[in-house]
Image: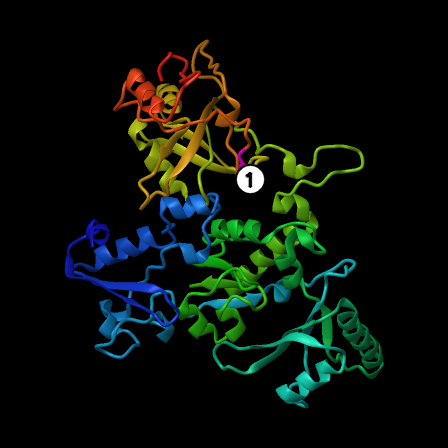
């Protein structure tokens, strides 16, 4: 109630209920429609995890299920939605929202797998299945003739619920899947003579993406793809772009209802691109195709993995993010939930932000942004006050520990120099090492230096045992 009340007056207090799939869903009614629209625009997609949740996940980027899903209900109230009046709002019923039903493309529709196979390949993507001549049970029997299928999925149109002639089959062994491909290839050569295209098949790109570094591609691309999708939604002329399926977590109940893909609803089905409010499907498909072509051209570089080369050269994935072209503040360590708005809010107290440029990730996988302030003289002050500090309110701005450093000239004859300790360096994930008997030193950050003196901090530490040495780090002006 307190959070929603910040956007405007509520006509009635929020009501909460638990849906059939265990999700907690709350609904409320604002007095002004503009307040409801502002709440949706601000909260939708914001990380809803607590600080302890993030810590348990080693501060990994949030999954779709970790973020707020906020929608406007038709007519402005639950009773005006597609659900029965008087009942608790349930996303499983498929609410009528402003976003409407999503558009889905399986990844193999966008780009087919290519290159040599490996023993980890066991799934085949099929298209042009003979639906006019065979029923679904007959097609399943035909596939069982090649081995022991672990999973068979025939794709259906999300609106008509009819088979599309495309599907996936995953066999128990690589050899069984290879046998199906060989048989289809032989039939295809015969069909060429008869001018009948017949069934087409290829190794499943969805399976290869899900397998990540353990499979044929030898690189983890799914998270990198999702990060790129978040950034290209606007240019692709849609409100949201997601990569779902393949065990990446269950879909929101409403999306599962719209798509009518049972396997996708629990996250086990093939990988799909899901687009909301897509205005131009031709442009969207073109952008997705270009994205997949880029990912497949250099999997290691796109996924951020480090691949050793025979010549000992540095792989493209190890290179730092591109250097700025003008004096600015280089910011690192912020989460994927941060967009330009969050960066501007953090630096607003220093006279406003002139520009924000996201520059990819550094070699540690940490996101990088180049920030220019409207008042150049405030950049040094911003770096001194924000570097190595915890920022964010945990609601509109996800909390994180950021690093800031100046780049370029700071003014006539001015320069910056500082000592950086090893434990200050940003790391995407610290090594999971067990404590050793030789470990006796602790690195601390975010000490309450504004509330306690140096002596008080020392006494607090003495409460845990005998201290041999305390080293409180200071900035260039000798301040803690």
Tell me if residue 69 comes above or below residue 56 in the rendering: below
Say which of 140 and 52 sits in front: 52
Tell me if residue 57 comes above or below residue 478 in the rendering: below
* Image location of residue 68, percent across then percent down: 36, 56
Quadrant for residue 106, please give it.
Answer: bottom right
* Image location of residue 248, percent across then percent down: 52, 60
* Image location of residue 29, percent across then percent down: 20, 63
Write down the residue under mark 1: 432
**Looking at the image, which residue is at 52% across and 27% down?**
439
**Looking at the image, which residue is at 34% across and 31% down?**
347
Tell me if residue 261 comes above or below residue 252 in the rendering: below
Horizontally, residue 314 falls left or right of residue 53, namely right
Classify mark 1: helix, strand or loop: loop
Magenta segment? 429-435
> Badge 1: how crowded within 10 Å, few (<14), some, or many (20+)?
few
* Image location of residue 76, percent across then percent down: 23, 67
Specify the principal SS of the magenta part: loop
**Looking at the image, which residue is at 48% across and 62% down?**
275
């Amino acid at each position: 109630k307190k959070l929603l009340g910040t956007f405007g007056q509520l006509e009635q207090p929020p009501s909460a209920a638990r849906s059939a799939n265990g999700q907690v869903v709350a609904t409320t009614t604002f007095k002004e429609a503009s307040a409801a629209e502002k709440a949706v625009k601000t909260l939708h997609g914001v990380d809803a995890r607590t600080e302890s949740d993030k810590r348990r996940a080693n501060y990994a980027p949030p999954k779709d299920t970790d973020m707020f899903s906020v929608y406007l209900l038709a007519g402005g109230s639950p009773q005006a939605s597609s659900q029965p009046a008087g009942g608790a709002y349930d996303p499983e019923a498929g609410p009528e929202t402003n976003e409407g039903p999503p558009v889905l493309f399986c990844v193999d529709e966008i780009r087919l797998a290519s290159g040599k196979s490996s023993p980890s390949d066991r799934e085949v993507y099929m298209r042009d299945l003979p639906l006019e001549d065979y029923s679904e049970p007959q097609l399943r029997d035909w596939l069982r003739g090649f081995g022991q299928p672990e999973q068979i999925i025939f794709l259906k149109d999300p609106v008509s619920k009819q088979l599309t002639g495309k599907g996936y089959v995953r066999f128990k062994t690589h050899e069984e899947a290879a046998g199906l491909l060989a048989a289809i290839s032989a039939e295809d050569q015969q069909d060429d003579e008869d001018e009948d295209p017949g069934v087409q098949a290829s190794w499943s790109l969805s399976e290869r993406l899900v397998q990540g570094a353990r499979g044929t591609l030898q690189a983890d691309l799914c998270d990198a793809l999702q990060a790129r999708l978040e950034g290209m939604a606007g240019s692709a002329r849609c409100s949201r772009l997601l990569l779902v399926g393949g065990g990446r977590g269950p879909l929101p109940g409403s999306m599962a209802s719209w798509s009518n893909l049972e396997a996708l609803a629990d996250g086990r089905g093939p990988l799909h691109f899901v687009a909301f409010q897509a205005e131009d499907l031709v442009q969207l498909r073109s952008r997705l195709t270009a994205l997949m072509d880029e990912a497949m051209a250099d999997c290691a570089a796109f996924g951020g993995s480090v691949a050793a080369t025979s010549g000992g050269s540095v792989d493209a994935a190890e290179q730092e993010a591109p250097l700025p072209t003008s004096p600015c503040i280089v910011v690192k360590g912020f989460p994927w939930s941060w967009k330009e708005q969050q960066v501007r809010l953090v630096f607003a107290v220093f006279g406003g932000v002139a520009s924000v440029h996201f520059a990819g990730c550094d070699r540690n996988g940490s996101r990088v942004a180049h920030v220019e302030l409207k008042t150049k003289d405030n950049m040094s002050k911003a770096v001194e006050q924000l570097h190595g500090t915890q920022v964010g309110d945990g609601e509109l701005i996800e909390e994180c520990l950021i690093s800031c450093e100046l780049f370029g000239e700071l003014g006539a004859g001015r320069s910056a120099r500082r000592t950086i300790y090893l434990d200050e360096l940003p790391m995407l994930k610290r090594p999971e090492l067990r404590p050793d008997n030789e470990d006796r030193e602790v690195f601390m950050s975010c000490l309450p230096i504004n509330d306690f003196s140096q002596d008080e901090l020392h006494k607090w530490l003495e409460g845990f045992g005998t201290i041999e040495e305390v080293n409180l780090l200071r900035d260039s002006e000798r301040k803690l």
